[in-house]
Amino acid sequence: MVDLLDQGTQYGNLFSYKYYLRPLAHRLYGNSPKTKIKHQQNIQKLLQNLFLNGTSTTWDMAKTRFHNDVSAIRTKEKEYRRLLVGRTDRGKHSAGVLDIGLVVKDGKSYKKGSPSDQYRLSLHGILYCLDVLNLNYKDIDKMVSKYANVLPKIFGKWEYLKSVLKDVDVYKLKILSKGLLLDNPNLSTYQGVPLYELMSFLNIKYRRYFESILEKDLAEQISYWFYTYLLYQRKLSKTDNKKDTVHLGVQKLQRIFDRDKELKDWYVEFFKEAETYYQNRTNVIKNSGIF
């Protein structure tokens, strides 16, 4: 994974995505694949290209559109480069998707002799695509195969997760991509299941990284969110059997962790860290001397 300084951009934590980058990207690049604005259409096509094909040079990206038409490839390559890095006209710079943080540089390609920059989606870029583009499960599966090393605890476990969970649970990142169930103060679940506490601690753990975060740390934050979100349950209806459904989320996590010790040990560490945090905060209240 390329260091942040080598990626040609920077980005923040999930709060930064929800409150800064997502609204900005919606304004600049659209909040729907049905946009009528040509520039937004071009940006969305570029992002979808990287979503489906993974790390690519501008030449690689253009070649997926025109194959062996060299003249058309060169024209499209110039367009992609401008959309990626922006342009300066009369001393005024127009930002590209690289500046915004939806795309990152990912090393060099030497296929054409001289070195060429390679690009791929950032984790925020993946979330934006899941949020805005009209993607089906097949598209998401293809993306996962290209980005498994970027989000290893989810994408690197994809086939295993699909064998254990239902599709409605595996593709939950679409919920996060819309900024939902991240910091909702009304987030509630059944008694004895610490969804609210774990989500709150997750935000506390990464709160200092609003402006800048390493990609590996953002991947960890997203992964903690993904597995913690499995605890979420819809509210019981009058016809539901509370005894059978109250701990369904816990059962999902147990099924995953029972067959993957690596994931279990990783999540247990986070769980214990949260437990220690709340114990310490409780002691602060007890020892405050207020009453």
Image: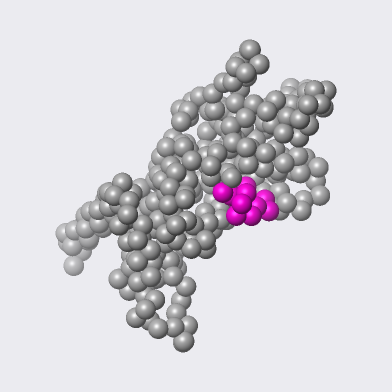
One can see residue 266 in this view: no
User: What secondary structure prevails in the magenta region?
Assistant: helix
- Magenta residues (range): 127-141
Identity of the residue drawn at 47% across and 50% down:
159
Residue 138: x %, y % from top left: 61, 52
Query: Is residue 150 left or right of 72 when viewed as pictured?
Result: left
Q: Nearer the viewer, residue 58 or 288?
A: 58
Residue 138 covered by magenta stretch: yes
Where residue 151 appears, as percent x and y from the top left, is 46, 42
Q: Which color scheme did the rendering employ for the protein?
A: one colour
Q: Position of residue 239 (x, y in %)?
A: 46, 87
Describe residue 60's horizontal placement relative to residue 101 as left or right: right
Q: Quadrant of the C terminus?
A: bottom left
Quick check: is 91 in the magenta stretch?
A: no
* Residue 215 visible in the picture: yes
Identified at 71% across, 48% down, the residue is 30
Say above or below: 269 vs 49: below
- Identify which residue is drawn at 43% across, 66% down: 232
Q: Quadrant of residue 53?
A: top right
Q: Is residue 192 left or right of residue 187?
A: left
Give the vertical position of 110 relative to 184 (above or below).
above
- Outermost residue toward the bottom in this view: 238
Place of residue 4 in the rendered image (x, y in percent of width and height, measured from the top left)? 48, 29
- The structure residue drawn at horizontal position 40% and vertical position 83%, both measured from the top left corner, is 241
Quadrant in which residue 195 is drawn: bottom left
